[in-house]
Image (tube, helix red, strand yellow):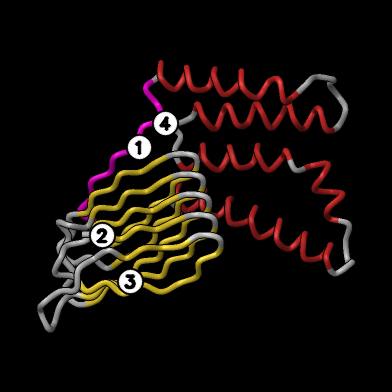
């Protein structure tokens, strides 16, 4: 299992467990809201861990999020008596300055000839260019981050399937003009936009896209 898959699984588990907890509370089977009110800062720490595993070279932003999560958790547990609100901006400023000093915060550039995409961006960005001769599809997930996937130099022999997921983030997809792009999926407080032109060839290569947008967006264009 690669780093992107591990990080994606961590984020998936967080979202699923939170949803199940709120559902059980709504059904009167558990007092999850009270539990969440006490331990919700742990989500920031786990999210930072997931982002760090997915992209260890871009460690400063996850580190700042983890520090904030630890301070907030200690404050909620009444182990320290500090004004967290007054600390947020200093932490943001320090994190931003460190990102400039260590030249972080830029999108991670990836060029590949692989036939299958497997991209995951959390609290970061990925700029991926695919030059495959027989592109099969794959998946791209952006959580509080962004992905730019450029397929304009790739080729599809017949049909490919691509899953795009944007959670409070965005995915930009660029495809050749001679591809037929079909988009379906689920928008939840978000959406997708297909700006591609319709190919003139009768037997054009087909890219089937399944897009899930939760407070995020997907843009597909030539």
Whether the magenta-drawn stretch holds residue 159 is answered as: no
Residue under label 1, please give it.
107
Say which label, 3 or 4, has the lower sequence index.
4
Where is residue 148 shown, x and y percent of the image? 32, 49
**Residue 199 in which image quadrant:** bottom left
Say which label, 2 or 1, has the lower sequence index.
1
Residue under label 3, please give it.
161
Where is residue 200 shown, x and y percent of the image? 11, 77
Q: Secondary structure at mark 1?
A: loop
Say which label, 2 or 4, has the lower sequence index.
4
Instruction: Using the numbered discs, state the Cα–Cα distance from disc 4 to disc 1 in whole angstroms.
Output: 11 Å
Residue drawn 72% across and 25% down?
Answer: 85
Q: Nearer the viewer, mark 2 or mark 3?
A: 2
Residue under label 2, please give it.
221
Q: Secondary structure at mark 2?
A: strand
Magenta residues span: 103-114
Q: Which residue is more in the foreground, 190 or 87? A: 190
Q: Is residue 82 above or below residue 27?
A: above
Disc 1 and disc 3 in contact, CB within 8 angstroms:
no
| Total numbered labels | 4
């Amino acid at each position: 299992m690669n780093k992107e898959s591990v990080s994606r699984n961590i984020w998936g588990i967080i979202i699923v467990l939170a949803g199940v907890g709120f559902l059980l509370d709504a059904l009167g089977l558990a007092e999850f809201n009270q539990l969440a009110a006490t331990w919700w800062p742990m989500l920031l720490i786990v999210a930072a861990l997931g982002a760090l595993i997915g992209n260890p070279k871009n460690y400063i932003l996850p580190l700042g999020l983890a520090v904030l999560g630890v301070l907030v958790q200690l404050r909620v547990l009444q182990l320290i008596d500090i004004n967290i609100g007054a600390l947020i901006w200093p932490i943001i400023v320090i994190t931003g300055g460190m990102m400039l000093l260590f030249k972080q915060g830029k999108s991670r550039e990836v060029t590949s000839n692989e036939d299958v995409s497997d991209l995951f961006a959390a609290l970061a960005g990925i700029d991926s260019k695919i030059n495959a001769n027989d592109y099969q599809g794959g998946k791209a997930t952006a959580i509080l981050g962004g992905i730019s996937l450029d397929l304009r130099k790739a080729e599809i022999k017949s049909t490919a399937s691509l899953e795009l997921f944007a959670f409070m983030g965005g995915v930009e997809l660029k495809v050749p003009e001679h591809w037929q792009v079909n988009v379906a999926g689920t928008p939840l407080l978000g959406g997708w936009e297909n700006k591609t032109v319709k190919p003139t060839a009768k037997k054009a290569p087909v890219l089937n896209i399944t897009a899930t947008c939760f407070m995020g967006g997907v843009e597909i264009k030539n």
